[in-house]
Image (spheres, grey):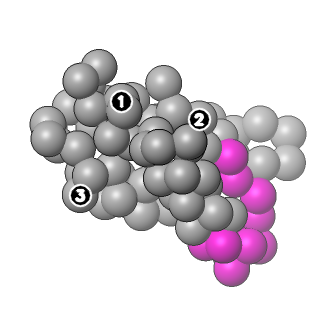
């Protein structure tokens, strides 16, 4: 799932080399932290958060297919 987030983010941003995805396990779910260049933050979030919400939805679907729960934090 980490690769999925990284793939989506790299396709959107202008500086794909600065995309960093880290993974942290909580109690019963996995938290993915997405870091991008400051100039690309608007591209990843999108108007009214639409792109960020779409990325979160795709992550949730992938997590459900694997039988787990996942959360995406962008910042």
Q: Circle 3: is it few (<14), some (14-19), or many (20+) Cα within 10 Å? A: few
Q: Which residue is mark 2?
A: 73
Specify whether residue 23 is in view.
Answer: no
Q: How packed is label 2: few (under 14 Cα within 10 Å), some, or many (20 or more)?
A: few
Residue extending farthest bottom:
65
Q: Secondary structure at mark 1?
A: helix
Q: To which residue does mark 1 refer?
A: 41
63 within the magenta span = yes
Percent across and percent down for residue 41 are: 36, 30
Crowd class of label 1 (few under 14; some 14 to 19; many from 20; radius 10 Å): some
**Residue 31, relative to residue 2: is it above or below?**
above
Instruction: Tell me residue 37's x, y (percent).
Output: 26, 25
What's the mark number on residue 11? 3
From which residue to which does the magenta span run? 61-71
**Foreground residue among 64 and 49:** 49
Question: x and y percent of residue 7 in the render?
Answer: 31, 60
Considering depth in this image, is 67 or 39 the residue closer to the camera? 39
Q: Residue farthest to the right?
A: 27
- Residue occupying the point 55% across, 43% down: 49
Image coordinates of residue 36 in percent, x first then y, are 32, 30
Does residue 23 show up magenta in the picture? no
Tell me if label 3 and label 1 are in contact, CB under 8 Å: no
Query: Marks 3 and 2, how far apart in space?
Result: 18 Å
Could you tell me which residue is drawn at 61 percent across and 72 percent down? 62
């Amino acid at each position: 799932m980490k690769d999925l987030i990284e793939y989506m983010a790299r396709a959107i941003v202008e500086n794909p080399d600065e995309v960093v995805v880290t993974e942290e396990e909580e109690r019963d779910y996995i938290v993915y932290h997405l870091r991008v260049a400051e100039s690309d933050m608007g591209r990843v979030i999108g108007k009214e958060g639409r792109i960020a919400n779409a990325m979160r939805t795709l992550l949730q679907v992938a997590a459900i297919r694997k039988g787990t729960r996942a959360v995406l934090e962008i910042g």
